[in-house]
Image (cartoon, grey):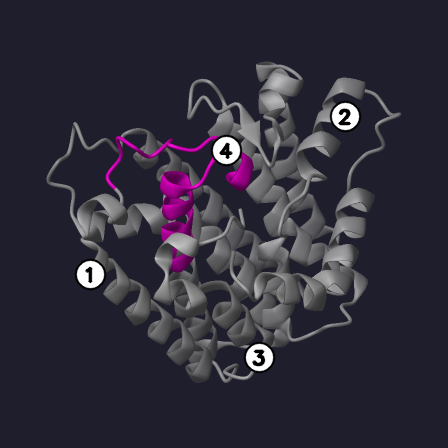
């Protein structure tokens, strides 16, 4: 385990507690009909998780005492993330059985309920943005537009279908560049949305917002490499989810020898730090998060810990 993980969790616990409370507030009560749907929404969303995406929004916004609207905006990426996990786990997708140490939503309830739960959470994400009264109209438009791109065919949806079609048996000639692009659509776009949204809330624009976007892309690549290592080297109990799912897929682990992979990690860490400096945030919580999450693993990649 990363030696900084416990300290990181302690430092961020007040913000995480605020995020958890806000997520629960956003959900309809389980005592309201349709009961199964609302219970499934609570089940899927209010489970143990790092809440990394909301934290990225808050850190990019630079506010450790967030306003109600900023806190709600930070929760948007977690609503979308949870919806994507529910769909990713379905029998017609990855056919997973375990998520965050509990049965997947489609197993705990039913496939139809799981699909509708994902749709409801995704719909809620857009509603949360629209309901933030303190946001300037143009900021709302920018955030909603970015979210539609994040979810759509050039984002999470496109990443999911590319991942389903990703097979070493079908594409032995897969390139590192194409796999990194798949990683971006599958994972990086939501990190980018979460971080850039925080930058918008901070008032960043132009080159600084572009630099923050590039930072998020680098962060997403590091995160996906870690996730691949977790899938390859961890037990189900350690990961809290099914492992070995990527055995037949083209990944950076399958395409790059260890030394080159370490070089990719080192280069991407450098890029992330440089982009934060270009955004004027080199001393921010974002820099601390990068150092705590990934720097130790540069020395021992197999020590990557679960954070999904």
Q: In which quarter of the image is residue 285?
A: bottom right
Residue 86 x %, y %? 56, 30
Cα–Cα gap, marks 1 and 4: 28 Å
Q: Quadrant of residue 263?
A: bottom left
Cα–Cα gap, marks 3 and 1: 30 Å
Task: Give the foreground label among 2 and 4.
Answer: 4
Q: Between residues 219 and 10, which one lies in front from this camera angle?
A: 10
Q: Between residues 141 and 149, which one lies in front from this camera angle?
A: 149
Q: Mark 2 or mark 1, which has the lower sequence index?
A: 2
Lateral position of residue 250 relative to residue 271, left or right: left
Q: Residue 116 bears which disc, if any?
A: none
Badge 4 density bin: few <14, some 14–19, many ≥20, Cα 10 Å: some
The residue labelled by disc 2 is 39
Res 101 seen here: yes
Lateral position of residue 32 relative to residue 152, left or right: right
Lateral position of residue 239 relative to residue 172, left or right: right
SS state under label 4: helix
Cα–Cα gap, marks 2 and 4: 25 Å
């Amino acid at each position: 385990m990363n030696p900084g993980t416990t300290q990181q969790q302690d430092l961020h616990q007040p913000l995480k507690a605020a995020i958890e409370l806000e997520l629960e507030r956003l959900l309809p009560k389980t005592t309201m009909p349709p009961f199964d749907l609302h219970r499934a929404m609570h089940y899927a969303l209010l489970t143990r998780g790092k809440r990394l995406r909301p934290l990225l929004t808050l850190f990019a916004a630079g506010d450790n005492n967030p306003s109600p609207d900023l806190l709600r905006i930070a929760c948007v990426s977690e609503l979308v993330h949870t919806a994507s996990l529910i769909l990713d786990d379905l029998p017609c997708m990855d056919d997973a059985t375990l998520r965050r140490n509990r049965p997947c939503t489609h197993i705990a309830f039913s496939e139809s309920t799981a699909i509708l739960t994902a749709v409801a959470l995704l719909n809620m994400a857009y509603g949360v943005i629209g309901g933030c009264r303190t946001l300037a109209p143009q900021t709302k438009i920018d955030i909603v537009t970015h979210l539609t791109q994040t979810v759509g065919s050039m984002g999470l949806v496109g990443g999911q279908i590319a991942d389903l079609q990703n097979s070493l048996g079908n594409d032995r000639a897969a390139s590192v560049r194409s796999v990194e692009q798949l990683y971006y659509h599958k994972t990086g776009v939501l990190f980018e949305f979460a971080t850039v949204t925080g930058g918008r809330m901070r008032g960043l624009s132009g080159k600084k917002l572009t630099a923050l976007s590039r930072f998020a892309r680098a962060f997403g690549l590091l995160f996906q490499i870690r996730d691949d290592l977790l899938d390859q080297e961890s037990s189900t109990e350690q990961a809290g989810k099914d492992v070995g799912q990527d055995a037949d897929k083209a990944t950076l682990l399958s395409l790059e020898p260890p030394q080159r992979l370490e070089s990719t990690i080192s280069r991407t860490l450098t890029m992330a730090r440089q982009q934060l400096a270009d955004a004027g945030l080199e001393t921010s919580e974002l820099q601390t998060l990068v150092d705590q999450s990934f720097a130790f693993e540069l020395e021992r990649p197999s020590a990557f810990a679960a954070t999904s």
